[in-house]
Image: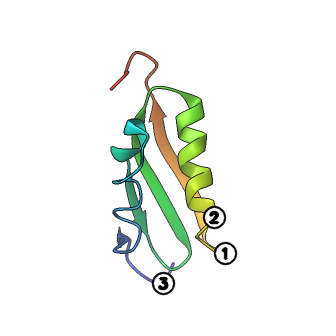
Amino acid sequence: MNACPSLAPDLADFFVHSPIGQLRRLVVIDNDTEVLITGQVSSYYHKQLAQEYLRRILGKRVIVNHVEVCAGESR
């Protein structure tokens, strides 16, 4: 990797305005080659949904999905 990871200025607020509350809590960090998604959601559906939302705008960068599924969470 060529650059240090940082909060992606264009992606940092990507989920902030999502109509899905689960996604508004996620954090996006990127560098030249990959985008990392972190946080917690209550289902694997929401984890996959976050990844697919980002996939549409990332081009050739790799998505690293470190979102944790906590089935007991329902926020």
Look at 42% across and 82% down and name the residue there.
3
Disc number lying in front (3 or 2): 2
Closest to the camera, between mark 3 and mark 1, is: 1
Q: Quadrant of the C terminus?
A: top left
Q: Which residue in the rendered view is the most extreme toward the front? A: 19
Q: Which residue is mark 3?
A: 2
Mark 1, mark 2: which one is toward the viewer?
A: 2
Given the current orientation, which residue lies at the most extreme right position?
60
Secondary structure at badge 3 equals loop
Q: Which is nearer the N-term, disc 3 or disc 1? A: 3
**Which circle's residue, 3 or 2, is located before the other in the chain?**
3
Binning the other alpha carbons within 10 Å of mark 1 as few (below 14), some (14 to 19) or many (20 upward) gives: few
Query: Contact (CB < 8 A) between labels 1 and 2?
Result: no
The residue depicted at 46 percent of the width and 75 percent of the height is 31
CA separation in Å, label 1 and label 2: 10 Å
Could you say which disc has been placed on residue 56 in the image?
Answer: 2
**Would you name the residue on which mark 1 appears?**
60
Three-letter amino acid code of the residue under disc 2: Arg
Q: Position of residue 9 (x, y in %)?
A: 33, 74
Residue name at image x 58 percent, y 51 percent: 51
63 or 49, nearer to the observer:
49
Instruction: Identify the image quadrant of residue 41.
Output: top left
Q: Residue at x 39, y 63 (%)?
A: 29
The three-letter code of the residue at mark 3 reads Asn
Callout 3 touching callout 1 (CB < 8 Å): no
Instruction: Please provide percent x and percent y for residue 63.
Output: 58, 60
Q: Residue furthest top?
A: 72
Q: For this view, does 1 lie left or right of residue 62?
A: left
